[in-house]
Amino acid sequence: MATLIAVLITIFTFGLNLERTMDEVMGTITDSIKIITMMLLIIGGGWAFKQVLVNSGVDKYIAAMMDAGEQHLAA
């Protein structure tokens, strides 16, 4: 509900109040939603990849390799 109110206030404040047409405002909103969608897909893909690593146990293998590399560099 808060997001809807924020969008409506933004449409009025930065769009109609500045004498833009509704088509211009909707074009801006469409462009913004495209960018937000891509960001959410990237974040979701990263989460899914992390979960695959955790469920398969590969995360522990990678952590052990990183720990061994740090010890090698410290010596």
Image (cartoon, grey):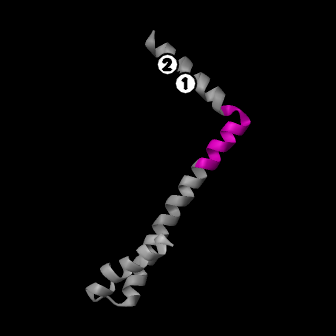
* Residue found at the very far top of the displayed protein: 75
Residue at image coords 47%, 70%? 2
The total number of labels drawn is: 2
Q: Which residue in the structure is indicated by mark 2?
A: 70
Which type of secondary structure does the marked residue at label 1 adopt? helix
Q: Residues within 10 Å of mark 2 (few under 14, many from 20)?
A: few
Q: Which residue in the structure is indicated by mark 1?
A: 66
**Left or right of residue 11, residue 53 in this image:** right
Amino acid under label 1?
Met
Is 51 a magenta residue?
Answer: yes
Is 30 a magenta residue?
Answer: no
Vertical placement of residue 55 versus 3, above or below = above
Residue at image coords 60%, 48%? 47
C-beta proximity under 8 Å, tags 2 and 1:
yes
Residue at image coords 35%, 90%? 21
The image position of residue 64, as x and y in percent, is 61, 22
Residue at image coords 63%, 45%? 49
Amino acid under label 2?
Glu
Magenta span main SS: helix
Which type of secondary structure does the marked residue at label 2 adopt? helix
Which quadrant would residue 67 be assigned to in this image? Answer: top right
The image position of residue 30, as x and y in percent, is 46, 77
How far, Cα to Cα, is label 2 from label 1? 6 Å
Q: Please tell me which residue lies in front, 51 or 9.
A: 9
Which quadrant would residue 10 be assigned to in this image? Answer: bottom left
Vertical placement of residue 55 versus 60, above or below = below
**For the magenta stretch, what is the residue range?**
47-58
Q: Residues within 10 Å of mark 1 (few under 14, many from 20)?
A: few
The image position of residue 25, as x and y in percent, is 38, 83
The image position of residue 24, as x and y in percent, is 37, 85
Vertical placement of residue 22 versus 35, above or below = below
**Left or right of residue 9, residue 30 in this image:** right
